[in-house]
Image (cartoon, helix red, strand yellow):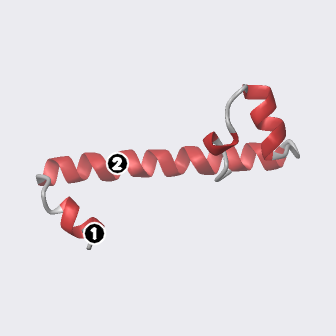
Amino acid sequence: MGKTLSEMMANFTHEEQAEIQEKANQLTAEEITLRELRKAYHLTQMEIVNNLGVGQNSICKS
């Protein structure tokens, strides 16, 4: 059986855990920003993919 996130995080120091949480917060904020921009410009995910030249999996959560 796999480990839970809590079990995995317990292996890191408090400083490392804080850095991980900070990066997770940053990524979440970036994802929300991309979603808001996409919707504000009334663009589909495929239009973004075509404009950026990336795979849909790169933006599929926006």
For this view, does 16 lie left or right of residue 48? left
Which percent across, then down, holds residue 56? 70, 42
Q: Nearer the viewer, residue 51 or 27?
A: 51
Which percent across, then down, holds residue 43? 85, 43
Residue position for label 1? 2
Which percent across, then down, holds residue 3? 24, 68
Q: Residue at x 15, y 63 (%)?
A: 10
- Give amino acid for label 1: Gly
Looking at the rendered structure, the number of numbered marks drawn on it comes to 2
Q: Which mark is residue 22?
A: 2
Q: Residue at x 56, y 43 (%)?
A: 30
Instruction: In the displayed orientation, state which residue is furthest to the front.
Output: 1
Q: Residue at x 45, y 45 (%)?
A: 26
Q: Nearer the viewer, residue 59 or 18?
A: 59
Instruction: In the displayed orientation, state which residue is furthest to the right.
Output: 42
Q: Nearer the viewer, residue 29 or 51?
A: 51
Q: Residues within 10 Å of mark 2 (few under 14, many from 20)?
A: few
Tag 2's secondary structure?
Answer: helix
For this view, does 31 lie left or right of residue 17? right
Compute the Cα span from label 1 to label 2.
Answer: 24 Å
Q: Quadrant of the N terminus?
A: bottom left
Tag 1's secondary structure?
Answer: loop
- Give amino acid for label 2: Glu
Q: Residues within 10 Å of mark 1 (few under 14, many from 20)?
A: few
Q: Residue at x 22, y 53 (%)?
A: 17
